[in-house]
Image (cartoon, rainbow, N blue to C red):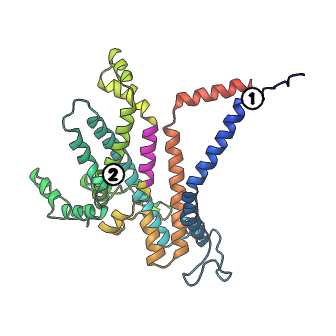
Amino acid sequence: MVAPVLTKPAAVPTATRRSGRRRRESAAGLLFVSPAIVMLLLFMLVPILMAFWVSLTKWTGQGSPFTGGVPFAGGTNYADLFVRNGLERQDFMTSVRNILYYVLLVVPLQTALALGMALVVNRRRLAGKSFFRTAFYFPSVTSSVAISIVFLFMFTGGGAINAVLSVFGIRGPAWFSDADGVIHVIVSRFGGSPPGVLVNHGLLGLSWWDWLSGPSVAMCAIIALVVWTTSGTFMLMFLAALQDIPVEVEEAGLLDGANRWQQLRYVILPMLRPTMFLVVTLGLIGSWQVFDQIYIMSQGGPAKTTLSPAYVSYATGFQDQNFPAGAAMSFVLFAIIVLMTMGQRWLLRDRDAARERKAARRWRRT
C-alpha cells in the first residue's frame, strides 16, 4: 500500500498579507472618520458652494437664491470691488489697507512673543514653571468679549494706559476717537505736509497717501489686545517643539563653543521650521479673519480706520442686505489668505532640502 503524499500548502507572500492588512486598516479608518466627513460636507462644503453661487447672482434676499427667477450676474459682483467706484469698493479697499498694517504688526509680534515665552518656560532651572505656563496661556482661554470690554476701559481717555503714560510725562491720545494713521501723525509732528504726488494719485479707490497712512491709533489698541490674547496658544506649539529637540543636539552645540544666541540661531530655529510655518500660517489666517474684536470694540470706527474685510463682508451682507456683494467680499478674502499662505510657505521653505530635491530630479533625468 502506497502512503499518501502530503504536500505543504503554498505560503502566502508577505507582500500580499501586508497589502490585505493595509486595505482592512484603511477601510476601518474610513468607517470611523465617515461621520466627520459627512458632517463637514453638509455643514461646511455645501454652505460654501451655496455662498459662492450667491456671489454670482443678484439675489435680493427674497425667496430662494437657487430658483430660476434669480438673475445671474457672473463676475459682476467681483468686478465691482476692483473697478466700479462706489461706497462698497471704498469700504472694502479701506478694510484691506487697515488689515495689511494689522497683519504686518500682529503676525511678527505674536510669533516673536510666543517664541520668547516658550524659550523662557522651557528652561530646566526655571522655578514655578506651572505658574508661568498658566499665566502665559490664560489670556488665550479667556472670553474675547470679556477681554475686549476690559481693554475698552483701559484705553479710554482717563483709563489705565493714559494714567501710566502720564507718569512719564506723555499725554495719551483718545485711543478709540483718533482716526489719524501713525505715519500721518509722525509726519505732522515734524511739520511736514503730504506730497502732492501721493494725494493726487490713487490705487483701487484710495489715494497713495491713504494707503501709506499706517495703522490708526485705535487699530494699535486692537493690535495690542490681539497680540496679548493669541501669543499663549502659539507658545504651547513652540514649547512642544522645543521639548522634542534632543538634548544631545543642544549639548553638541555647547561643546562646539556656540553661545546662547548662536545656539538659538543655528541649532534651535532650524529645527523649529515646521512649527514656525504652522504658527505663521495660523497667525496669517486669524489676522485676515479678525472680526469679534472689531465688532465689540469699534465696529469699524473711528472714520472706518478699524474696518476689517470680515466685518465689511458681514455689514454689507446682513446690515445692508446686499448678500451677493458680501459673499463676493468673503471669497476675495479667501483668495487673499490662500495667496498669502503660499507666499509665506515659499519664504519659510527649507532651501537646502529644495536644492537636494532639484539635484535628485536632475540625476534621475540623466
Instruction: Indicate the quadrant containing the C terminus: top left, top right, bottom left or bottom right.
Output: top right
Image point 26% across, 43% down: which residue? 133
Q: Nearer the viewer, residue 146 or 297?
A: 146
Give the magenta-colored segment's residue range: 274-285
Residue 358 x %, y %? 63, 29
The numbered mark at residue 11 is 1
Instruction: Indicate the quadrant containing the N terminus: top left, top right, bottom left or bottom right.
Output: top right
The amino acid type, in three-letter code, at marker 2 is Thr
Q: Secondary structure at mark 2?
A: helix
Q: Nearer the viewer, residue 58 or 88?
A: 58
| On screen, residue 319 above or below 229 | below
Nearer mark to the viewer, of 1 and 2:
1
Image point 51% across, 48% down: which residue? 341
Residue 14 x %, y %? 69, 30
Label 2: few (<14), some (14–19) or many (≥20) C-alpha neighbours in 10 Å: many
Residue 302 x %, y %? 31, 68
Image point 26% across, 64% down: which residue? 146
Mark 2 = which residue? 230
The amino acid type, in three-letter code, at marker 1 is Ala
CA distance separating discs 1 and 2? 58 Å
